[in-house]
Every structure is written in structure tokens, then in C-alpha cells.
Image (cartoon, coloured by chain):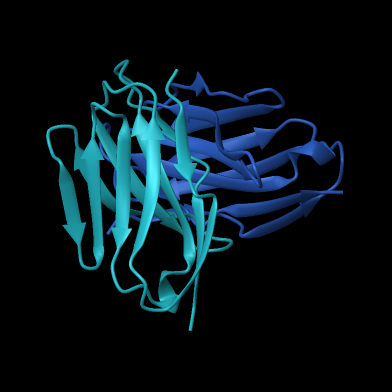
Amino acid sequence: DVKVTQSSRYLVKRTGEKVFLECVQDMDHENMFWYRQDPGLGLRLIYFSYDVKMKEKGDIPEGYSVSREKKERFSLILESASTNQTSMYLCASRVSPLPQHFGDGTRLSIL
Amino acid sequence: KQEVTQIPAALSVPEGENLVLNCSFTDSAIYNLQWFRQDPGKGLTSLLLIQSSQREQTSGRLNASLDKSSGRSTLYIAASQPGDSATYLCAVPDSGGSYIPTFGRGTSLIVHP
């Protein structure tokens, strides 16, 4: 069974900090995704990666960057955290065009 | 760009009822359609995948149908149970080759005993 693991379930950080959210998958999937999910707004795609060292902007990339140095790991970076980045962050992986497998999410609070 | 709408946004029913959740999409040139379940504070779990050539898929008490021409899919839940309480989302991959899914905002379901 596919396992997508996000490093933290809950995270509290301060405004201005550099924040790293990590995601690891164990099924050699080429594609990986980062979403944020907010009440009333649904899932919004931040960045996705087709393969190692490849990345594409999603719908809301501002204030975020990503890193994919190894196939199994996709990191989301908040360069300078702000309160409006408080949200639930979800990572997913897949072999296109099959359905994505999601991690359990990281609930991030920026104070 | 594909738009996906789910109706109703919320549903509260007594245990045992048969339920219909609706999903509509604007671009009928879809490759497949996916239904997911999300429990509170958790990630999404894939429930059913319907290929564009199929009209329905079944898994246990769940049945999903697809009508591409009208841009609609329905998720039918038979004999609902409290354990079915969750948010149900549908997703449609874009037709441009990347297959990046567009998600609906979901239907929040509560089944009370």
C-alpha cells in the first residue's frame, strides 16, 4: 500500500520564520503535489513536481518555494512565514494519470 | 479551466438513509473522475475512479455514476451509517495532458444514529 508521510501533523511557527514542510512517499511515484486547504476555499494547488528537480507553479505559489532533490521527497518552504499562511497543508503523490495518494496533512499555525 | 461544483455543501441525515451526492463539471472532455473521502483533520482517501468510457463504478455500499455529456457525476451511498460521516470530494483531471485534478469543495456529510 502506498504511504505518503508528512513530517508533522501540527506545527506552530512565528511570523517571519523560514518554515519547511516535508513529504516522503514510498512508491517511486514521479508526480508530487503540495496543496493548502482552507474552509470555504477547498483545495488549492501550490506547487507540483513531475520528477526529480522539476517543479511547476500551481494556482497560489506566492510566498512559497519547493525542493525535490530526491524522487521520494518533496519539500514545501515558506520563505518568510505570514499569518495568512496559517492553513492545512496536504501533500500527494501519484503515477499520472492515476488518482493521487494523500498524506495526513500538516496543520500549520503562524503566530 | 475546469470548474467543479458539488451540491449540497452539507448534509445531515439519520442512519439508514440512501444518499445522493452530486458533482458537476464544466469541461466534458475528461479522462476520468475521482471521488475521495476526507475525515476531519486528515488527508484524502480515494474511494472510486470512473474512467471516461465507463458509466458507473461500485465499491460495497458506494456507487458512482458518470454522465459526461451533461457534465455530472453522482455518488450514491446505500444504507448510510454513522461511520460514513466525512467530507466527500470529487476531482476531475484537466484534459491538457498534465492530468492535474481540479477538486470540488466537497459535501460535508453527517449521519446521526
Q: Residue furthest bottom?
A: B113
Viewer can see residue B38 = yes
Image-quadrant location for residue A35: top right
Along the line of sight, the residue nearer the viewer: B27 or B36: B27
The chain coloured cyan is B
Task: Say if A1 sits above or below B67 in the image.
Answer: below
Q: Position of residue B38 (x, y in %)?
A: 47, 57
Q: Is residue B62 rendered to the left or right of residue B37?
A: left
Along the line of sight, the residue nearer the viewer: A97 or A4: A97
Along the line of sight, the residue nearer the viewer: A69 or B3: B3
Q: Is residue B105 rendered to the left or right of residue A30?
A: right
Task: Say if B78 sits above or below A70 in the image.
Answer: below
Viewer can see residue A71 = no
Residue occupying image coordinates x 46% and y 42%: B6
Q: Position of residue B104 (x, y in %)?
A: 47, 39
Q: Position of residue A4 (x, y in %)?
A: 42, 52
Q: How many marks?
A: 0
Q: Is residue A2 rendered to the left or right of residue A72?
A: left
Residue occupying image coordinates x 77% and y 51%: A109
Residue occupying image coordinates x 65% and y 43%: A40
Q: Is residue B66 rendered to the left or right of residue A93?
A: left
Along the line of sight, the residue nearer the viewer: A39 or A73: A39
What is chain A's hue in the picture?
blue
Q: Residue furthest left?
A: B53
Task: Say if B111 sits above or below B55 in the image.
Answer: below
Residue occupying image coordinates x 26% and y 20%: B29
